[in-house]
Image (cartoon, rainbow, N blue to C red):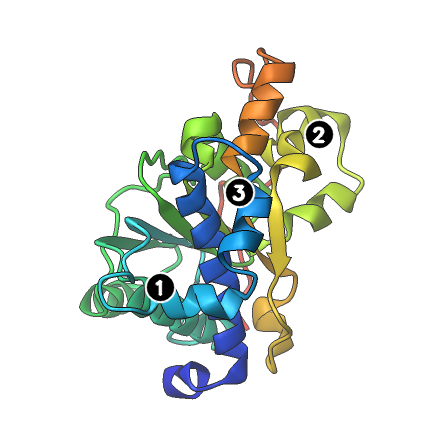
Amino acid sequence: CMGDMKGSTWFQEVKMIVCDHVKRVMDGMQASGGDREAENVRQGSSIAGNLAHMEGEGERTKISRMVCYGIGNFSVSASSLLQISLALLLKDFLHPPSSSLFDPVMTGAERQAAESLGFTIPQEDEVGLCTTDSDSLFFMPHCGRRLYSNVLRANWGPGNLSRLVVIGNSFGAYRMRNLSTDVRTSCCVEKLGEEMVVETLLPKHVEENSFIDTSVHSFPLKKLLLREQHDKEFWRELAADVGGDDHSWTRSMS
């Protein structure tokens, strides 16, 4: 499964997309001014060029931390097996010094297997409230809306959010749904809106259900700071997220 995926055109395209978003995070930390998107075009109009740069010796560790949520029972679920295979391939590509994996439905044998593959297993369920002050990739395909909201909530503010890359359900798709007023005012995915998120949909996979509606998201520092200039209270006031069903981590196995 993992070997077939590694050699596929699909994975090469996914690597290029992830690479582009990681580069946006790096550029955001380094840029001192000017239009960052224009800078991205000047420095690498080809995403493939960015990929080649990252794969150079000494240039591969661009993410300090990788956090995986909600992969499920990969010993019995074909979709979960594909998802953990992608997580492993990205881990091998990015070489983060720290990588963890958690899903409360995992069996003891699955936890041991994940540890043998180089993942740390958290002892407590963080329900997504994982704060990070380093450049981090959150790999969480097909999790619930509230779990994504919690990841953003734990890192709320330009400094931390701009360090994140999130692979998961399309944030744009959530914004198109008819969510209740309470959810719209308390869900961090909704509060960020389209203007503060860069989103790239993953290419279609042959096993469509495994990665359907899955996107890579990043949060440009310039756009986050611009919102702060226009609304100083935006980052200070954050209502409790009262909607959703995701703290139970309920998911079906396929």
Label drawn at residue 148: 3
Q: Residue 96: horizontal and vertical position, in percent?
A: 27, 56
Q: Would residue 246 be seen by someone viewing this image from the given angle?
A: no
Q: Dividing the picture into quarters, in which one does residue 5 lie?
A: bottom left
| Whether label 1 touches label 2, CB < 8 Å | no
Q: Would residue 138 be seen by someone viewing this image from the given angle?
A: yes
At horizontal 23% and vertical 69% (from top left) the residue drawn is: 117
Amino acid bearing label 1: Met
Secondary structure beneath dot 1 equals helix
Q: Which of marks 1 and 2 is nearer the N terminus?
A: 1
Secondary structure beneath dot 3 equals helix
At horizontal 49% and vertical 55% (from top left) the residue drawn is: 43
In the picture of the structure, the residue carrying the numbered disc 2 is 184
Q: Residue 32: horizontal and vertical position, in percent?
A: 43, 31
Q: How far apart are marks 3 and 2 (CA)?
A: 14 Å
Q: How far apart are marks 1 and 3 (CA)?
A: 27 Å
Q: Residue 108: horizontal and vertical position, in percent?
A: 25, 63
In the picture of the structure, the residue carrying the numbered disc 1 is 54
Q: Classify 10 Å Cα crowding around label 1: few (below 14), some (14-19), many (20 and above).
A: some
Image quadrant containing the N terminus: bottom left
Q: Classify 10 Å Cα crowding around label 3: few (below 14), some (14-19), many (20 and above).
A: many
Tell which residue pokes out farthest to the top in this image: 233
Left or right: residue 191 compared with residue 142: right
Q: Dividing the picture into quarters, in which one does residue 10 lie?
A: bottom right
Amino acid bearing label 2: Arg
